[in-house]
Image (spheres, helix red, strand yellow):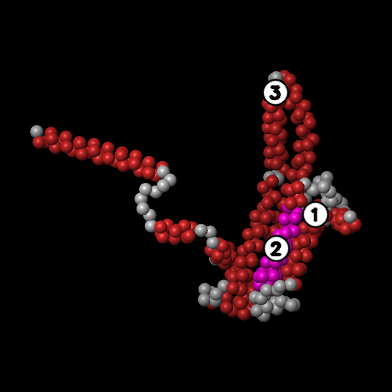
């Protein structure tokens, strides 16, 4: 009898525990489903956690300056300076030229190839569209399609041809942004590396102290001290070079621009002025790098405008290409001035 009662009690206890767990889980589910918290919380702790999660520009700046690519580039610049035993202004200029020649110029050539292939592809699709439209109209009468169905079939076939032509010509539109995806991070890392060499405390890296002393005397021309900002000359030259680059591309074709093209052109001009202002506040080492990069970029763009160079680099010709691009720029500039 006792054994039966004991077994019954054990079963009853397990049943009660199981029922209690289900009740507790249901209660928790109802609690977590509500927005309001049912238990008291330490307000100061919560306030500290919220403040800790807030975005901080200082923390963002420190995270970039201490990132692996920036530190690696910073050490590479020091090693190049020590190995070649040349002044710092030459290290900055030659390193910029090397990066532009070895990495950025091939990407720029590939970008021009892709843009030209896409332009020719769109012309080919434009010629194909009337024939495809005729076939769709014939099928519309044969199968009694409505206008919506016929339009869907036409769009689907045009998209299929578009994807086939992209694979055939190896000119996916995403490849047109590869240059920016590489160039912008390199520009940021190089700028931060030079700022680290100028402003980083020597307690973190004893070698920085000697590098800073070298930067103070290994400038050139009017900016012999690369740790001090140049408030006038370099920013003005930088602004002139960047605006020249923008206006050259704008003057290649004079005509009615779309709203988006006008917005992008004016945005580029504003960004150029902002970069010039930032150059006036940065050390001469950074602003000199920006000037070198922009100057080499201007030369690269002018080089890629030449029809002979484009043929040598196997950039396909398009209907919009001109055999005299430089004369067109001069003539369009005169027309714009005389307006």
Q: In the displayed orientation, state which residue is furthest to the left.
A: 1
Labels 3 and 2 touching (C-beta < 8 A): no
* Residue closer to the observer: 56 or 133: 56
326 or 7, nearer to the observer: 7
Distance Cα–Cα, label 3 vs label 2: 55 Å
| Residue behind mark 3 | 146
Instruction: Please state the horizontal and vertical placement of residue 332, each as a whole percent of the image.
Output: 87, 55
- Determine whether 292 is above or below 149 in the image: below
Which quadrant of the figure has residue 41? bottom left
Decide: is 172 above or below 193: above
Circle 2 is placed at which residue position? 274
Q: Please indicate, yes or no, whether residue 267 appears anywhere in the rendered image.
A: yes
Q: What residue is rendered at 29% in x and 41% in y?
A: 21
Q: Earlier in the sequence, mark 3 or mark 1?
A: 3
Describe the element under mark 2 as helix, strand or loop.
helix
Q: Which quarter of the rendered picture does the C terminus lie within?
A: bottom right
Picture quadrant of residue 119:
top right
Q: Quadrant of residue 267?
A: bottom right
Marks 3 and 1: CB-CB under 8 Å?
no
Residue at 73% over, 57% down? 268
Q: Find numbered disc 1 in the image and state the secondary structure of the residue it sits on.
A: helix
Please give the range of residues in magenta.
264-292
One can see residue 79 in this view: no
Between the C-alphas of marks 3 and 1, the distance is: 45 Å
In this view, 172 is above or below 331: above
Q: Position of residue 261 (x, y in %)?
A: 76, 50
User: How many angstroms separate mark 1 from mark 2 (CA)?
Assistant: 20 Å
- The residue at which mark 1 appears reads as 250
Q: Mainly helix, strand or loop, the magenta region?
A: helix
Is residue 41 in the magenta section? no
């Amino acid at each position: 009898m006792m054994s039966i009662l004991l077994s019954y009690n054990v079963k009853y206890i397990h049943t009660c525990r199981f029922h209690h767990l289900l009740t507790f889980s249901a209660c928790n589910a109802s609690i977590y489903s509500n927005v309001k918290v049912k238990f008291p919380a330490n307000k100061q702790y919560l306030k500290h956690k919220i403040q800790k999660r807030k975005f901080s520009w200082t923390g963002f700046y420190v995270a970039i300056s201490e990132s692996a690519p920036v530190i690696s580039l910073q050490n590479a610049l020091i090693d190049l300076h020590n190995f070649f035993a040349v002044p710092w202004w030459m290290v900055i200029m030659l390193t910029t030229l090397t990066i532009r020649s070895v990495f950025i110029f091939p990407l720029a050539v590939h970008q021009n190839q892709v843009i030209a292939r896409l332009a020719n592809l769109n012309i080919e699709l434009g010629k194909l569209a009337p024939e495809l439209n005729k076939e769709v109209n014939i099928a519309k009468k044969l199968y009694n399609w409505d206008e919506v169905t016929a339009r869907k079939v036409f769009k689907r076939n045009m998209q299929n041809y578009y994807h086939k032509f992209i694979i055939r010509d190896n000119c996916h539109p995403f490849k047109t942004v590869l240059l920016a995806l590489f160039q912008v991070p390199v520009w940021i890392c190089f700028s931060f590396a030079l700022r680290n060499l100028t402003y980083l405390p020597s307690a973190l890296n004893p070698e920085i102290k000697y590098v800073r002393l070298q930067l103070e005397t290994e400038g050139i021309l009017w900016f012999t001290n690369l740790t001090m900002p140049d408030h006038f000359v370099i920013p003005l030259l930088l602004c002139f070079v960047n605006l020249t680059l923008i206006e050259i591309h704008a003057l290649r074709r004079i005509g009615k621009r779309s709203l988006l093209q006008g917005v992008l052109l004016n945005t580029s001009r504003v960004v150029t002025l902002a970069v010039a202002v930032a150059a006036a506040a940065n050390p001469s080492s950074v602003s000199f790098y920006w000037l070198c990069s922009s100057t080499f970029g201007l030369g690269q763009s002018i080089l890629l405008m030449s029809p002979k160079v484009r043929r040598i680099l196997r950039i396909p010709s398009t209907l919009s290409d001109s055999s005299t691009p430089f004369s067109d720029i001069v003539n369009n500039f005169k027309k714009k001035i005389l307006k």
